[in-house]
Image: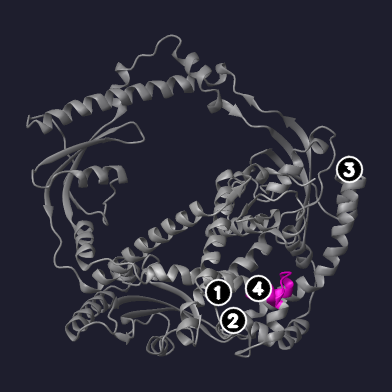
Amino acid sequence: MFDFVHKHKILIQIVLAVIFLPFAFFGVDSYFRNSDLGADIGSINGRPITQQEYAQSLQERQAALQRMIGGGSIPPGLLDSPEIKAAVVDGIVRQRLLIDRAVKSGVLIADSQLQQLISEQPAFLEAGKFSNVRYTEILKRQNMTPVQFENGLRRDLMVERVGDAYRSTAIVSNAVADRLLRINAQQREVSQMVIEPQQFMAEAKLADDAVKQYYDSHQDEFKVPERARVEYLVLALDNIAAQTEVSPEEVRQHYEQNSKQFAKGEERQASHILITADASFSPAQKANARAQAEKMLQQVRKKPASFADLAKKNSQDPGSAAKGGDLGSFPRGAMTGPFEDAVFSMKVGDISDIVESQFGFHVIRLTAVKGRGFEDVRKQVELDLKRQRASKKFSELAEQFSNLAFEQGDSLKAAAEALKLTVQSGGWVARNGADNKLLNNPKLLQAIFSDEVIKNKRNSEVVDVGSNTLVSARAVEHAPASVYPLADISGGIAKQLMIKQAGQLAAKHGRELLAKLKAGESVAAEWTPAKMISRKDQQGFAPPEIAEIFKLDSGKLPAYAGVENPRGAFILLKVSRTVEAADVDPARRKATADELRQVVAQEQINAYVASLKAKADVKLRLERLEQKPQ
């Protein structure tokens, strides 16, 4: 049981993130507002894929994209692109087929396993114990019953079990892992010579009609999208909360009444460098791993500022190495015993001795201590209290805002005066996006470019753009899609064509030099100082250059290659010597073999799904993905 729960903790955390965060981005009602959009978008073995199922999956995928960029701005067209929609439908088909196969194969998740997994999730704990009240309340806020949540989680676990069958049987030999490690670690000494287009600008000549011909045949490049200059009005809960007064005594009382919510205990933030050494290692291998860790410890104690760089280059924990070893913040009970004991005995800035755990040897640096007493959370408590008091007023004003924007739709002035808001200028926005983050909302842009706003000169509907923020806008000026006049851009086109032609001349000259070099002829070339590079340490060389460098036959040196870069320059490359990798570290061999097994397993799963799809009766009506609500 413990193995099952431990193995699937990450999966349930992902499931929780998926069901919670989409509502934060899009609003609970958006999941159900358009549930009757029309005909099903397809079927699998006779069972329909409904518009509601598709809409929910699409919302989840869009929320995942938002999380990937940390809540930053994504062009509306990307979130609603045909590629995203097709991927969502493919994901539905994939999951259905794997669940069917799991059921037919007798892959079941026992109720006891599911209950144990759910009962250990921090989101559902209160005072360290599972709270059924908290569990049902959290799900209720997402318009979800425990049965719905548990059935969905059970399906995800069944799909995971089918994948486990492939992950557990994927085979990658040590010889393959060794070969890959040696290839990646091989170093090559490289010099380059850059032939720039500017060297040939004087030789570039344009035909008299070249600019016009290019303009006529590339109209899409010079399109100006449909635009509108807008003004808008914003009603935001945070703005109302900021104007709400609360006394220090009220803040203290609110904290004490909700102490379990705010006081969650001390957390610590740490970074580490891990040299792996698990139970399968021989005494000699463990000794070697400890020696590597000791070497890391000596280096970071000599130069503490180098910790992050050393972790990136040497740590064998793939989850934290790319972040300089940073593990983020965590409370007691989140880490393995020896590691946690060390972290919670350190002071900020301390670097530990070697700490051995079941994963290997750690060098740890404590970067922050985060307390959770009243003073630590006072500002958050105050904001929470203000938002609570402001929420009722926000609801009342939201209804008034919507009514005024509609009933007195020829101006935002009436709504602004009634709600004591300021009409703001939004500048120009395009149908496909806006620089103003607040206005760069797909639904709001759709409302702005509706006939009601553009043709009838009315206020837009009040749109929830997220974070309890409502916006209504109106178009002050409208410009239809057009094409820049040739007279305005002819100079830029001419310059672009000249540079392109100069680049072609540079490439021609570069290839001539390359042919001579490969033939063993002497050429006048000013090579840059040589650099030792590898596939991992590329020393500033671009990926296409790296590809050409490592294609060269290292048995015949010097060897030469050439490649054009995006700026139009031609890069001549010379490899003068190679340095083969030393003996392969056993820990790195194991880590590489594990990664390769995952790749092999994923390819096998993809092939298996493709075979299931070929045998199944899958009918899709993708044109219905574009169906709009009536």
Q: Position of residue 54 (x, y in %)?
A: 65, 55
Q: Residue furthest top?
A: 208
Name the residue that disc number 3 marks: 409
Mark 4 near mark 3, Cβ–Cβ under 8 Å?
no
Q: Tell me the SS state at disc 2.
A: helix
Amino acid carrying mark 2 in the image: Ile
In this orientation, which residue lies closer to the viewer: 319 or 342? 319
Name the residue that disc number 2 marks: 118
Q: Position of residue 240 (x, y in %)?
A: 79, 64
Disc ID at residue 149:
4
Residue 112 vertical position relative to residue 589 in the rendered view, above or below:
below
In this orientation, which residue lies closer to the viewer: 189 or 336? 336
Asked if one can make out residue 274 in the rendered structure from this viewpoint, the answer is yes
Cα distance, mark 1 to mark 2? 8 Å
Dominant SS in magenta: helix
Sequence order check, earlier mark of 1 and 3: 1
Horizontal arrangement in the rendering, residue 535 relative to residue 485 (left or right): left
Mark 3 near mark 2, Cβ–Cβ under 8 Å?
no
Amino acid carrying mark 4 in the image: Phe
Number of the front mark, 1 or 4: 4
Mark 1 near mark 4, Cβ–Cβ under 8 Å?
no
Disc ID at residue 12:
1
